[in-house]
Amino acid sequence: QVHLMEFGGGSVQTGGSLRLSCVGSGYPPENYCMAWFRQAPGKEEREGIAAMYTGSTSTYYADDMKGRFTISVDNSKRTLYLQIDNLKPEDTGKYYCAGRLKCGGSWRPPTQYEAWGQGTQVTVSS
């Protein structure tokens, strides 16, 4: 069973940057699909930000998340990253990483992911 744990959240001011990390354990399969999600305060749904296969450099981004978010992976450290630049107050929320066998064209809905981390909080103040 794959276990995921996020790190790197915090409180930052508008315009700042953060790099979130997600460490995987439990021997995730090679070329595993991993993604980042965000849950805004007061909202139940987690919105997909970006996804990628751990064995590939190909990435997938939500259209409204392109530009300020960068997903990457370091397999030697079993770590997935999310770089967030030019943070805005509306980026405030809890950020989760998730994994499943295949990304596919429908990577964004959170319902089909089998592994989730506990989340890391990001708070952006103006």
Image: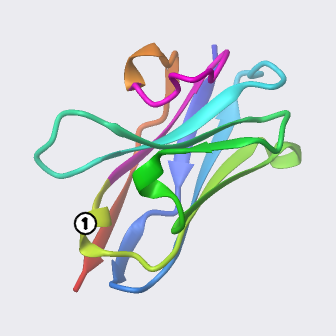
Identify the element where label 1 is drawn.
helix
Residue 56 percent coordinates (x, y): 84, 37
Nearer to me, 63 or 116: 63
Residue 82 image offset from top left, x and y in percent: 58, 57
Q: Residue at x 53, y 55 (%)?
A: 7
Rendering coords of residue 25 (x, y %)? 70, 30
User: Left or right: 29 with respect to 64?
Assistant: right
Depth order, front residue of 46/115: 46
**Front position in the image: 118 or 53:** 53
Q: Amino acid at mark 1?
A: Glu
Residue at 51% x, 68% y: name it: 68
Task: State which region is magenta.
Answer: 94-109
60 over 99 or under it: above or below: below
80 shown above or below 126: above
Q: Which residue is mark 1?
A: 90
Q: Is residue 81 left or right of residue 114?
A: right
